[in-house]
Amino acid sequence: GTSRNRYSAGLKESADHNESEGNGCKMNWQKEAISELRNYEKRKSAIASMTERLRILDEKFKSIRCATTDNVPVMGGASRLEDSMLNNIAERQRLELNIDATVRLVDLTERGLSSLDDKQRTVLEKFYIRRPPRHVEWLMEYFCVEQSRVYQIKDDALYNFTISMFGLIDY
């Protein structure tokens, strides 16, 4: 109804406020915050996958080092064994850097979420992290509030999360 229209207008107004002005360099921090929330679970899952891949590469590296066959250099001057070892080392280093960066992003998101009260955290979770079917209705029933109040809580929570993640966002 009208509260939905007011909400949509508020989003447009908020997006317009955050959009580029003048030279086009202004960041839309709220979009970044939403992206962080939507990627949160995927990043947590990626950490586990990358860690397992790193273990596999470690095992492959051990088996490459143990191999004594194929020590004949190929045209480039290195043996296939040396090429395999170098590729493995490079891939493990890239993976370790990716794991470290992803862990830091997950930690930052968790820190941002921990700055919210339980109600705000629950609303952001249902909107952006683990969105169930009919999430707005679920939140209305859970908190015994009107739809407009759910969106107001979400907007306040998103603002607070964005401030917690990125600091000053109104410049």
Image: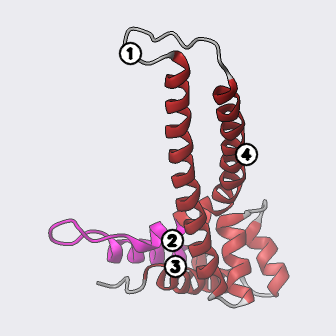
For the N terminus, the quadrant is bottom right
Q: CA distance from mark 2 to mark 4?
A: 28 Å
Residue in the picture at 42% in, 71% down:
12
Q: CA distance from mark 1 to mark 4?
A: 33 Å
Q: Which residue in the protein does label 3 denote? A: 6
Q: Is residue 34 left or right of residue 169?
A: right
Q: Which residue in the protein does label 1 denote? A: 77
Residue in the picture at 61% in, 61% down:
38
Instruction: State which mark lies toward you, 1 or 4.
Output: 1
Marked residue nearer the N-terminal end (1 or 2): 2
Crowding at mark 2 (Cα within 10 Å: few <14, some 14-19, many 20+): many
Q: Which residue in the protein does label 4 denote? A: 52
Dominant secondary structure, magenta = helix
Residue 116 in picture, x, y percent from top left: 64, 88
Q: Residue 57 falls in which quadrant of the image?
A: top right
Instruction: State which mark lies toward you, 2 or 3.
Output: 2
The numbered dot on residue 33 is: 2
Q: Is residue 29 left or right of residue 64?
A: left
Q: Secondary structure at mark 3?
A: helix
Give the magenta part as a residue range: 5-34
Residue in the picture at 66% in, 75% down:
124
